[in-house]
Image (cartoon, rainbow, N blue to C red):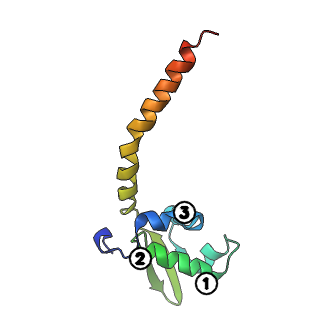
Amino acid sequence: MPASQARHDVFQAVADPTRRKILKLLAEKEMPIASITERFPITRTAVNKHLFVLSEAGLVTSRKIGRETRYELQPEPLRELQEWLSFFEIYWDNKLSALKNFVESDED
């Protein structure tokens, strides 16, 4: 699903720590829901709900292989996050440079 057609906001989707962990798992390889579920202290239903939100945001896709559903990361929507965060890099670079100058100029 193209990011323009996503039904959930990418920012909302990655706001949850469990969903971020699921994305990290899927960055390594495509996985069935059973393999994903065994890595979390939550129910399969809860994992399925997280996968639904990620899917609606365009961050994961699923496909059936026999009786198994496999999930795969779709990193393209994460570009929106990267672009938003890169806007603020200059702010942090400036603040860190100012702190460095302050610390180095302190002669006490």
Q: In the rendered image, which residue does mark 3 sit on?
A: 20
Q: Earlier in the sequence, mark 1 or mark 3?
A: 3
Residue 94 vs residue 48, the one in the foreground: 94
Q: Amino acid at mark 3?
A: Arg
In the rendered view, tell whether residue 6 sits above or below residue 14.
below
- Residue 50, image quadrant: bottom right
**Residue at x 44% of width, y 75% of height:** 55
Q: Which residue is mark 1?
A: 45
| Residue 3 left/right relative to 19 | left
Disc 3, SS: helix
Residue 92 quadrant: top left
- Image coordinates for residue 17, horizontal then vertical, percent: 58, 63
Residue at numbered disc 2: 56
Disc 1 is placed on an element classified as: helix
- How crowded pointer 1 is (Cα within 10 Å; few <14, some 14-19, many 20+) is rated as few
Label 2's element?
helix
